[in-house]
Amino acid sequence: MKMFVKLAWRNVLRNKRRSLITFVAIALGLGILIHYSAFTAGFKEQMTDNSVRMYIMGHVLIHEKGFNDEPSAEKSIPNAEKILAEVRKSPEYGHVRGMTSRVKFQGLISSTTNSYGVMAVGIIPGTDATVTSVHKTMTRGKFLEERQENARSIVIGEKLAKALKVDAGEKVVLMAQASDGSMGAEAFRIKGIFRSSNPDLDRSVVYIPLRSAQNILAYGNNVSEVALLLDHSDRAEAVQAGIKKVLPKELEVLNWRELSPDLVAMMDMFDLDVIIVMVIIYVLVGVGILNTLLMAIMERVPEFGVLNAVGMKPSSMVQLILLEAFFLGCIGIFFGTLLGLADVAFLSRHGIDFSSFSAGLGRFLGMQTTIYSLFSWKGTLAPMFFVMVAVMAAALYPARKAAKLQPMEAIRHL
């Protein structure tokens, strides 16, 4: 066996040009697979993160039972601080990155020229910034601040500002039906205008201070929901289960998958698309490796004929060729992994700019125009394993064919 290893390694080094072409093909194929795995993982995670922060506004939401199915001012949580304290006692609190309480209601916003129906969100600016990212999308003015003079401030989307024909600094009136059946209304001065990259969100959601929202709905200290942001979206079910155990039965705890089934369906379709594309790429890479190895081995037919003529057994011939393929595969995988990881490291910091498709990405659940790759061990090790299997499988056919060659017939290829 030791002799075959030395002989296989010498054969790899003997024809450097042929070996270089082979392991470059392997390295490029592996690099492409690692790049695509990391890019699609980053795209999916970014899509989930943007949706959770901008639309669902949290990985886990706590409401009074029935609020999510039929939101109304009558359904509220009376003591949010107690709920937050119970969450902090939960064993899963270690996965919580941010918590906040807020008031949400349907209302009518009016300027001197127009009126539109909106979803109003009453927030505590400091804590809400740990859960959502709307404060990072301001284009004019500033986001809400926790100051007394900002109690009558409002932040609206760019599309809504154009529809109302208002700008930062101007006044609007927000009206809604209160929890006691009366009509609540307050005048606000526009403190800032945001652009989330999704036109639907920009024209339908407004943000006001929590106390102002409570006043409009005659809520007292009640809130509509408590929201949690986690360190990873995959932990939502576990955190949800742990929190349910410590909260009163009249409250419902929902994770982001339950809150947005449309997003889950879209992600399932995306996963299917990724699998189809990955299969195509894997087949192309495998065929490329097969073609390269087949040419590299079949051009050595006379050499194999001489080895048969001097008495090398067919099984030993197969073993020798597979050892050569293994060495070439290891070299190709080493450099291919370096190439793929370098690509992932670069794109995880700088990303790929799809600004020319900004409108489409914006409607695609508020995706930003720059997509960043995301490293994962699965996305790296799975392509490495596949490439090695592809190399050995590609070498097996020509190895068996070479082993069956008749010495005189093979030598005539000289």
Image: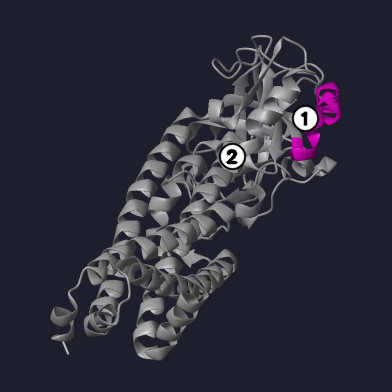
**In percent of the image, x 34 and y 68: which residue is there?**
318
159 vs 109, nearest the viewer? 159
Give yes or no for residue 90 being in the magenta stretch.
yes
Q: Amino acid at mark 2?
A: Val
324 vs 81, nearest the viewer? 324
Q: Which residues are magenta?
A: 81-99
Q: Select label 1 or label 2 by which is in front.
A: 2
The location of residue 340, given as percent across then percent down, is 50, 69
275 vs 347, nearest the viewer? 275
Q: Amino acid at mark 1?
A: Arg
Mark 2 is surrounded, within 10 Å at the Cα level, by few (under 14), some (14 to 19) or many (20 or more) other residues, namely many
Quadrant of the snapshot with the C terminus? bottom left
Kindly report the distance in space between the C-alpha atoms of the residues bearing marks 1 and 2: 24 Å
The location of residue 169, given as percent across then percent down, is 65, 50
The location of residue 221, given as percent across then percent down, is 81, 21
Magenta stretch: dominant SS? helix
Q: Which residue is mark 2?
A: 52
Q: Quadrant of residue 411?
A: bottom left
Q: Work out whether 37 lies above or below 290.
A: above
Q: Which mark is drawn over residue 211?
A: 1
